[in-house]
Amino acid sequence: MYLSQLLGIYLPALCCVLCPPLAAQRYQECPQTIMANERDRQRIIETGRKFSLVLERYRNKPADIVFLLDSSAIVGEGYFGCEVQFVRHFSKLFSVSPETSRVAVVTCSSCDKIYTDLDYINSPIGKNKCTLLDTDLRRTHYRDGETCIVGGLLRAKEILAGSRPSTQKIIFLLMAGQSTDGEILLELAAELRNTSTIFAIGLGESVSIDELNGIATSPSEDHVILLNLVTDVESLAVKVLGDQTDTSWDLNVTSDICNSLCLSESNCCDSHANCSCATQTGSYGCACHPGYTGDGEQDQCTACPNGTFKSQYGNQGCTSCPTLSTTAAEGSTSLSDCQCLPGHQGSPDMKVPCTPAAKPTDSGEDGRLRCSKPPSIENGSYETYNRGTSIAYLCDDGFMMYTFGDRTRHCRDGIWNGSTPICSTGGCSEEDAPTVENSAVQRFNGGTVRFYRCNARFERQWEGSMVIYCDGARWRNEPGRCVRASSSPCGPAPHVENARQTTHSEGLITYTCEPGYRRRLGRGSILCSADGQWIGSPGVCIRRGCVIPRTDSVQNGLINIKQSGAILQIDCQAGYELRGSSVLYCKGRQWNGTLPTCTSMQSSSGYPASVRDGTHCGNNIPTVSNADLRYSPRTDAEGRLFYALVYSCHPGHTLRPANYAVYCSGGNVVGTLPACLATCGYNNGGCQHICRNGPDGAVCSCRDGYQPASTDGKTCRDVNECLANNGRGPCQHICYNRPGSFSCYCHSGFNLAQDKTSCLRNQDQCNCGPHGRCVRLYDTRPTCVCYNEYRRSIDGLRCIIKYKIALFAWSK
């Protein structure tokens, strides 16, 4: 039988028998270390520097972490708080939230005193760094006893069995003395090291160096830390942590928490911010939305200025666009919003530097900018035509061409459109070709060109190329990678024609228009919210080149030309209504639809205007509780643009029905409004006790011993079980009501029976002596059970000797 299986049977059974109910006991604060001399100070500095370098490899990566604290008598109640402070400080090395790192705290002393004080690994919902530091860690208790570390490691193994497969597993073990477990401890530690990294921190001078080395991950010089004093934890933390900067925020908190941040004690967060928990430092605050920066409080979030962007929630500053690039507007949320300055070419999003495309004097007779020298091709050449504004690529003898659409490229406003083809040939070994995990290979040009396509449920990571080719001697281009696609509760992301879609780890998706196209009607990014809704607008990718009609081309209407001629907006005169799309955008060299018409409202048909007539709803916009509203430009089956009303539920709420349809027509709303219903995943659905997700949102119920205190069942009040039976409730003698329960007591001369409600007479009414024992049979009076040569007296309260019977032997 495996060691862990044997321990798994023995220790829980032992604890069931021996573990007593424990009263809550707050730990004491850790006393401050007084450095006796410069040597002690240098020792802590060197230990902290070394520990910091080792921990660096584990930071900023999702992890499941168990802190195992020694709660034995050798630590003592006065210094146990130093171990809790270790958790408080060193948990700040990791972002704690359901999506990043999760933690658990186990305290151990004797083998019958192994306790899990908190477990975010198996119960992560609603837990983050703020709940850890503000409430849950404070409930860690000191338990006196021996030093049974094997029981603590076994509990850590049970907890990590529920960890996420892709995360790193870490155990921080704090010991102040030698374990009572001997070799069995080292065997269990060796089994744990197969799946987890173990750090062993020795506190004080009573620890065994050999034992710590036998427990910790190898090399021991990186994973064993020795502190001469338990109180050195504080000094070590200062050296390891340094200045902490938050990089991620958990939005799964109630907005009421931030109401104490301002004098008004309500609506303290800016309209462009959410109340959140900083998952590194563990502090509550207002986090500005992507595209905004500031401290998050009311009127303190400002849009990122032109030339900068910010892609995450939080109070960090905006990031500057690469050199010679800028953004089209304020409030940009992605690097893809950075575009090269006019007269420059490149792609900041693709890490291609922006360089001058042409000098201002390099213009042709038509006044258009000329392009710089055309991109060259390996193992080939190109020919020019149309007075140098177009090129056609050719491959050298013995090489075959592979194109990404066309072998020609044309100069458009100082930039060459399209992509440079590939010239490939044989001579490369199939065995030497790079492999890309989780992908399928397509071969072209007789196998000299390899195209890697990611398998289902995997997506391309943009570093590297997905096309490699043979130049006759070796394979060219470094292939990219296929990584597992992050599962999104929001479902498939919207598709945008002529755009490349990139998925980021924070649930953010950005859209980058293909070369020659520009984005309009959106910011080019969407974010998956906690309630399963896409927030933001991807926009559309359009190309210049459409013939702009006269502004009076629509009879009884007016055409407004926007975005430098890329978009047309059509309005009708008073008394006329629009038939068709009110907005057209340039798609390639053609408009995406035909011009609408303006017809008199005195139509004899009697039919109302189409709900997809492209008009806004004006001021007649109904609100939905717990939801934000935005207009969403969409296209119908014929490519015509219209406006839909999109409601995005606040965190902790879900949209019902999910497939609702609400449009604008003639300045009015058409369709049935949805509702945003609370869910259990946020603030427990507003429930005081038990919450479950039903078809109509969160359903609240009360624990046993409580009853609903309101019609919605969200709040609960105690049931006083003692009110019945003249104040005795279910008890035979005395009833005492407790929150969610009750307790029964008996009058003098009686004891409480096993059913915890009945009372039986005291055992001391028997006089069995040393020859028997007194028992109570159900609700009868006490009686003696006598041993060997003794029997009960007539009254049953004494043991007396039996009568002796003589036996005679008969003989013939």
Image: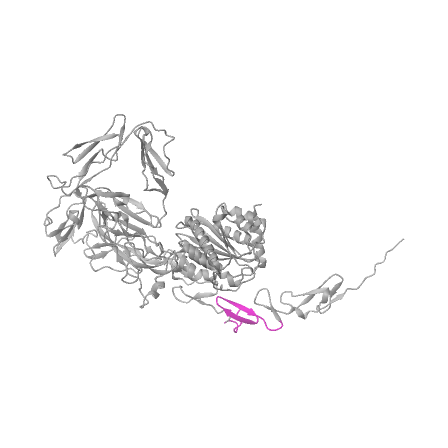
Q: Is residue 126 visible?
A: no
Is any atom of residue 630 visible in this view? yes
Q: Which residues are magenta?
A: 723-749
Question: x, y percentage for residue 187?
Answer: 56, 47
The one nearer the camera, 549 or 785, is 549
Q: How is the model colour-coded?
A: one colour
* Left or right: residue 663 compared with residue 706: left
User: Is 788 left, or right, of 266 in this rendering?
Assistant: right
Instruction: Name the residue nearer the viewer: 79 or 627.
Output: 79
Q: What residue is rendered at 17% in x and 32% in y?
A: 384
Q: Quadrant of the N terminus?
A: top right
Can you give x and y, in whole percent of width and height, for residue 634 in the image?
Answer: 23, 49
Residue found at the far top of this picture: 397
Q: Position of residue 623 (x, y in %)?
A: 27, 60
As for residue 791 lying within the magenta part, the answer is no
The foreground one among 700 and 770 is 770
- 724 inside magenta stretch: yes
Q: Is residue 268 above or below residue 549?
A: below
> Residue at position x 75%, y 64% from top?
790
Furthest residue to the right? 812
* Residue at the (26%, 47%) spot, across then down: 322
Q: Main secondary structure of the magenta part?
A: loop
Tally of marks: 0
Residue 750 in the figure: left or right of residue 514: right
Measured as percent of width and height from the top left, residue 380 is found at 24, 30
Q: Quadrant of residue 367?
A: top left
